[in-house]
Image (tube, helix red, strand yellow):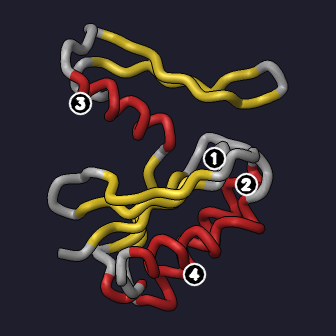
Amino acid sequence: MPNYLAIDTSANASVALVDKTTGSVVDQRISSKGNDQTETLSAYVKELLDAHGQKGQDLAGIIVGVGPGPFTGLRVGLVAARTFGFVWQIPVYGVMSLHALAEQVLDAGQVPAEFVVASDARRKEVYWARYDQDGT
């Protein structure tokens, strides 16, 4: 069964193989730095695909984080995802990074009527979004 390749550079460079059927993370690579997306992203993708005997053109698609996040870091991930998708001729799907955090809350059950997710925007600021029990 083909996997999805997930790419998010809204904070650190991170890539993962995601099982198409279950949605579970098969394997992942995450940088410990916050500004090395250009240096690490392609290597992480190659490592993951090689480690699992996958070829880019055999993936179900690419899921890419569209922010919010620092403009330069986001561009690296978005351009990489679109380029991989074009070369491998597979679909690319954009997902807001805060929606991914909200999904974790929804999957955990016992969801309050409303909840807030947040991520570090650096410079003593945060990105945040408010959701309801339906994920809206």
Answer with left or right where residue 43 lies relative to residue 110: right
How far is disc 2 from disc 1 in space, using C-alphas? 6 Å
Asked whether the residues under the numbered discs 3 and 1 touch, taking CB atoms below 8 Å apart as contact, a structural biologist would say no
Q: Residues within 10 Å of mark 1 (few under 14, many from 20)?
A: many
> Which residue matches tag 1?
10
Q: Residue at x 63, y 74 (%)?
A: 42
Q: Earlier in the sequence, mark 3 or mark 2?
A: 2
Q: Residues within 10 Å of mark 4 (few under 14, many from 20)?
A: few
40 or 122: nearer the viewer = 40
Residue type of the residue flagged with mark 1: Ser
Instruction: Classify mark 2: helix, strand or loop.
Output: helix
Q: Which residue is mark 4?
A: 83
Q: Nearer the viewer, residue 80 or 43?
A: 43
Q: For the residue marked with disc 3, what is the amino acid? A: Asp
Is 40 drawn above or below residue 47 in the view shown?
Answer: above
Residue 62, compared with residue 113, is above or below; it is below
Whole-angstrom CA distance, mark 3 to mark 1, is 22 Å
Q: Which residue is mark 3?
A: 107
Residue 45 in which image quadrant: bottom right
Disc 2 vs disc 1: Cβ atoms closer than 8 Å? yes
Ranked by sequence position, the earlier of labels 4 and 3 is 4
Residue 71 vs 119, above or below: the answer is below
Total numbered labels: 4
**Tag shown at residue 73:** 2
**Extreme-front residue of the structure:** 51
Q: Is residue 65 above or below residue 60?
A: above
Q: Secondary structure at mark 1?
A: loop
Distance of label 2 from label 4 (alpha carbons): 16 Å
